[in-house]
């Protein structure tokens, strides 16, 4: 495992922010199972969790207005560094009009021990939530969350709640789960009133 201090990295027209390596899940398809970086980035395993000043110093080297999106997504779950995310997102709002997104497993309420959706108000333009599977049993098998059986329902509840505070909310599944599971996942997404995006799995 190679470690570095890759706080921000570029993928296509997006700037990705890597605030933490902590995650309550061990997803079978996670990129970090296969290597130290993602999509050609430097290692994303952090030597330490960066303080606010270090994050800002890194971002000040970037032309924030030049990106299509700024995305909170690294080798960990962003809501495991929830207070830092909120501070950085608020800072970004004062620096650029570039849309801000978070890619999340949707377990923020379990991670932080409270209903967190209202705390996202005004901080994000979009949030992408990993649905991963069309039912609780398959979700637990694929995602392997440390919170166990309550995880799937908590993720769906978070998704329904955060719609009130973030303009664009989507679920995602990876295409390797197969057509039948994608169809059933679409039904779950429709039941919550959230669009589903099927993304291609590209091992780094």
Image: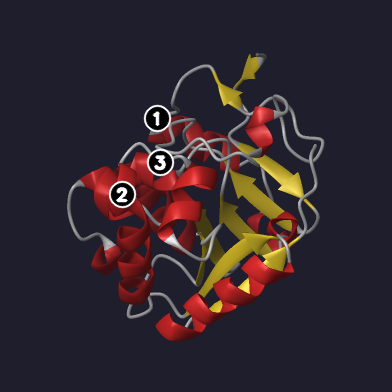
Residue found 56% across the figure and 47% down from its top: 73
**Pair 1/3: label in front:** 3
Residue found 24% across the figure and 46% down from its top: 112
Task: Classify residue 60 as left or right of residue 56.
Answer: right
Residue under label 3, please give it: 145
Q: Nearer the viewer, residue 193 or 49?
A: 193
Q: Nearer the viewer, residue 43 or 145?
A: 145
Regarding mark 2 in the picture, which secondary structure is present there?
Answer: helix
Q: Quadrant of the N terminus?
A: top right
Residue under label 1, please give it: 51
The CA span between labels 3 and 2 is 9 Å
Of the image marks 2 and 1, the number of the one nearer the N terminus: 1
Q: Residue 133 in the image: x percent, y percent?
A: 54, 60
Q: Nearer the viewer, residue 196 or 121?
A: 196
Q: Residue 71, located in which quarter of the rendered image? A: bottom right
Regarding mark 3 in the picture, which secondary structure is present there?
Answer: loop
Answer yes or no: do the residues labelled 1 and 3 have beta carbons within 8 Å?
A: no
Judge the density around disc 2: few (<14), some (14-19), many (≥20) Cα neighbours within 10 Å.
some
User: Is 41 placed above or below 128 here?
Assistant: above
Task: Classify residue 60 as left or right of residue 120.
Answer: right
Q: Residue 27 in the image: x percent, y percent?
A: 55, 40
Q: Nearer the viewer, residue 200 or 182?
A: 182
Judge the density around disc 3: few (<14), some (14-19), many (≥20) Cα neighbours within 10 Å.
many
Residue under label 2, please give it: 149
Q: Residue 105 in the image: x percent, y percent?
A: 46, 52
Of the image marks 1 and 3, the number of the one nearer the N terminus: 1
**Pair 3/2: label in front:** 2
Image label count? 3
Judge the density around disc 1: few (<14), some (14-19), many (≥20) Cα neighbours within 10 Å.
few
Regarding mark 1 in the picture, which secondary structure is present there?
Answer: loop
């Amino acid at each position: 495992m190679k470690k570095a201090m890759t706080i921000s990295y570029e993928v296509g027209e997006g700037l990705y922010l890597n605030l933490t390596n902590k995650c309550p899940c061990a997803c079978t398809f996670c990129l970090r199972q296969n290597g130290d970086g993602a999509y050609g980035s430097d290692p994303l395993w952090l030597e330490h969790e960066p303080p606010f000043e270090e994050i800002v110093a890194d971002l000040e080297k970037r032309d924030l207005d030049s990106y299509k999106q700024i995305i909170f997504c690294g080798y960990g779950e962003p809501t495991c560094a929830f207070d830092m995310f909120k501070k950085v997102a608020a800072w970004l709002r004062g620096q650029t009009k570039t849309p801000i997104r978070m890619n999340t497993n949707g377990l923020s309420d379990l991670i932080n021990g409270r209903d967190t959706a209202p705390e996202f108000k005004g901080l994000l333009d979009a949030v992408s939530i990993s649905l991963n599977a069309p039912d609780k049993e398959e979700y637990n098998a694929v995602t392997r969350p440390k919170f166990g059986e309550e995880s799937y329902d908590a993720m769906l509840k978070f998704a329904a709640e955060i719609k009130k505070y973030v303009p664009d909310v989507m679920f995602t599944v990876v295409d390797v789960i197969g057509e039948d599971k994608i169809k059933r996942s679409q039904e779950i997404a429709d039941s919550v009133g959230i669009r589903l995006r099927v993304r291609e799995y590209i091992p780094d």
